[in-house]
Image (tube, helix red, strand yellow):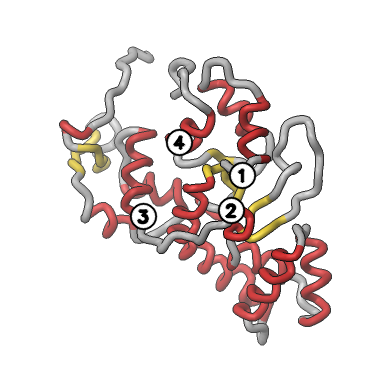
Amino acid sequence: MLLRRHDVKALAAIEHLVGMQSQTPLSPYVGLWTRLRGFRHEDLAGLLTDRSAVRIVLMRGTIHLVSADDCLALRPVVQPLLDRLLRTSYGRRLGGVDLGEVASAARALMEERPLSFAELDELLGERWPGHDALAQAVRAAVPLVQVPPRGVWGASGQARHVPAESWLGRPLGDGSAAGDMVLRYLRAFGPASVKDMQVWSGLTGLRSVVKGLDLVAYRDENGGGERLLEFAAGDAPARDIRFLG
């Protein structure tokens, strides 16, 4: 979508890209402006305020802007990555603490009102004193949406969080969308290796997912002979041909 601007709605573009990096809250506005003809900042701000799109920790354990549907479908897919972060980054700092109990307590607190991580740490610290990674552990264990005005152009506000299911009024998916995620990645970004997809997502074990998909493989002779995956000829998305040399 970078060769020219497209006549596509903002939400459709976000879904086509399988989400957009949003560690910096306003960066998706620039990303959409470069891709979409007639895009206005109000278009994305409206999606965030009416809950059609959200900002949530997903691929690579970083914040992404995604549609509400993708939030619910993709978060369970990337949860193994976040579970690994829980064990390696936070588990050592929370010795003796039942992380399941922490997550349940945090969820209950944030269902009452949106909380910053500083506020959440203070409240959880009353029950589990002497630990400094409680909120960060919750960030990995519980799907949390950063609620507006965070991420809204022209507005300011501290990052405050609410459980995704509460914010969207719908349950999370069952974690079976890994294959669909791979197909959408290829449709958006073209031929790729399993390693490419694992670096993009932060997940391991995608080779077994790929084996169950109807894809073709070939060697990229100009790129070191790497094995790339692509749709079968009849299923490949139409792409403009450009000479970029």
- Mark 1–mark 2 CB contact (< 8 Å): yes
First along the sequence among labels 1 and 4: 4
Marks 4 and 2: which is nearer the front? 2
What mark, if any, has residue 13 been given in the picture? none
To which residue does mark 3 refer? 178
To which residue does mark 2 refer? 168
User: In this figure, what is the number of numbered marks?
Assistant: 4
Marks 1 and 4: which is nearer the front? 1
Q: Quadrant of residue 28?
A: top right
Which class describes the residues within 10 Å of circle 4: few (<14), some (14-19), or many (20+)?
some
Q: Judging from the image, what secondary structure is the residue with disc 1 in?
A: loop
Which class describes the residues within 10 Å of circle 2: few (<14), some (14-19), or many (20+)?
many
Cα–Cα span, label 1 and label 3: 24 Å
Residue most extreme to the bottom: 96
Residue pictured at 75% horizontal, 58% vertical: 114
Query: On the rendered image, what quadrant is the C terminus found in?
Result: top left
Marks 3 and 2: which is nearer the front? 2
Nearest to the observer: residue 124 or residue 245: 124
Q: Judging from the image, what secondary structure is the residue with disc 4 in?
A: loop
First along the sequence among labels 4 and 2: 4
To which residue does mark 1 refer? 51
Q: The residue under label 4 is which amino acid type?
A: Leu
What mark, if any, has residue 17 been given in the picture? 4
Which class describes the residues within 10 Å of circle 3: few (<14), some (14-19), or many (20+)?
some
Cα–Cα span, label 4 and label 2: 21 Å
- Mark 1–mark 3 CB contact (< 8 Å): no
150 to the left or right of 72: right
228 to the left or right of 15: left
Cα–Cα span, label 3 and label 4: 15 Å
Residue pictured at 37% horizontal, 48% vertical: 181
- Mark 3–mark 2 CB contact (< 8 Å): no
